[in-house]
Image: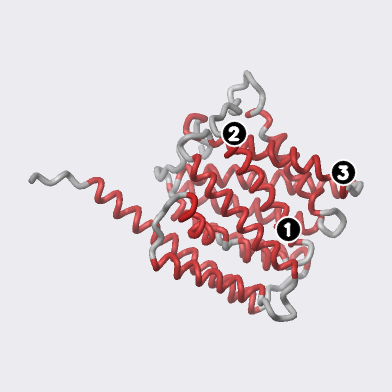
Amino acid sequence: MFFPKRADWRSPTRADHPFKGIALILLSTIFLGTSEVTAKYLSATLPSIEITWMRFVVFALMMLPAMLPGTPLFALKTERLTMQLLRGSALLSSALLFISGLGYLPVAVASAASFVSPLLVTALSIIFLSEAVGVSRWLATAFGLVGVLIILRPGTSAFGAAALFPIGSALCLAFTLITTRLMSGREHLLTTMAYSSLAGVSITTALVPIVWVTPSCSDILLGVLAGVTWTAGQCILVLACLYAEASVLAQFSYTQLAWVSFLGFLVFGEVPDIWTITGAACIVGSGLYTARRERVRRSQVLATAAQPPSNV
C-alpha cells in the first residue's frame, strides 16, 4: 500500500521506495493541475478570495481528524506554533496570489511562472538556512529566472500587472518550503498540514465577507472539486516525499505543466505560444539541473560518511 503508518509521517524524507514516490508525484500533478484549471473556471464568476476560502474550507474539513482530541490522528500539539502559523499564512498567500493571476492569465502561463519557486528557495536558503550555494546553482537559478522573463516579457504589451501574481505566488511558496524545511524532523507532518489549513481558513473567513458573491450550485460543486483535488494533491505530494528524495521527485513534478496545458486547451481553448514554451523549457531545464546537482552532492556526502575512518 502507498499510505504509510502514522509514525512514519515524522520523517522528512525516505528513499526506500523511489518508484512509489515517482508514481505518487505523477498522481499529485494530476490533482493539483485539475484544481488549478477548476479555480480558473471559477474566477470568471467568483472573486479570488472566495475561491481560496472554498479551497481552505475543504482542506480544513479533510484535516478535521487531525484536529479532534482523542482521535488516533490528533496532531495539534506543537512546539513551534509561530512557525506553523507563518507557514500556513505563506501557503495561503501563495494560493491567493496564484488564483488571482488565473483570472487574467492563461493557466499554462501562470503555472509555468510559478514553477520558479524551487529556484527562489536557493536564494532564501542562504538567509534562513545558512546554506552555502555554489556558482553552478546560482547560474541554474539565473537561467530559470530568464525563463520567467521570457514567459512574462516585461516591457512589452504582453506584460501586465497580473503577471506579477504568479511571481508573488512562487515567492510565498518558496517561503513555505523554507519553513517546512526548518521544521523537518521536529514537527509531525500531519501537524504542519493541520495548522496550514487552520491558518488559511481563519484568515479567508475574516476576509471573504468583504468580497462575497453568492455562488450558484454549480459554483459550490466546482469549489468543492477545487478544494478536494488541491488537498489530495498536497497530501499525495507529502507522501511522495516520504518514499523518495526530493531531487528525484523534482524531475517528474514538471509533468504538471503538460497536464495543465492540456486541460487549458480542453476547457478554455488556450494554446501556449512559443514564448511560454521556450520560457517553460528554461525553467524545467534549470530545475532538472539543480535536482541532478543536489542528487550528486547528496551521494558524495553519503559516500564520504560511509567510508571507514583512516588510521593515523
Q: Position of residue 307 (x, y in %)?
A: 20, 47
Amino acid type, residue under disc 1 in the picture: Val
Mark 2, residue position: 81
Name the residue located 69 percent from the left edge and 52 percent from the top edge: 95
Mark 3, residue position: 209
Tell me which corner region of the image, top left, top right, bottom left or bottom right, holds residue 48.
Answer: bottom right
The color scheme shown is secondary structure
Say few, some or many: other residues with alpha carbon within 10 Å of mark 2 (under 14 / 14 to 19 / 20 or more): few
Cα distance in 3D space between marks 3 and 2 = 27 Å
For mark 3, give the secondary structure: helix
Query: Nearest the camera: 300 or 7?
Result: 300
For mark 1, give the secondary structure: helix
In the picture shown, does residue 306 fall above or below 251?
Answer: above
Amino acid type, residue under disc 3 in the picture: Pro
Left or right of residue 201: residue 86: left
Disc nearest the viewer among 3 and 2: 2
Cβ atoms under marks 3 and 2 closer than 8 Å: no
* Disc ID at residue 73: none
Cα distance in 3D space between marks 1 and 2 = 33 Å
Tell me which corner region of the image, top left, top right, bottom left or bottom right, holds residue 164.
Answer: bottom right
The first of marks 1 and 2 along the sequence is: 1
Amino acid type, residue under disc 2 in the picture: Leu
Q: Position of residue 43 (x, y in %)?
A: 81, 57
Mark 1, residue position: 37
Name the residue located 43 percent from the left edge and 65 percent from the top edge: 137
Say few, some or many: other residues with alpha carbon within 10 Å of mark 1 (under 14 / 14 to 19 / 20 or more): many
The first of marks 3 and 1 along the sequence is: 1
Disc nearest the viewer among 1 and 2: 2
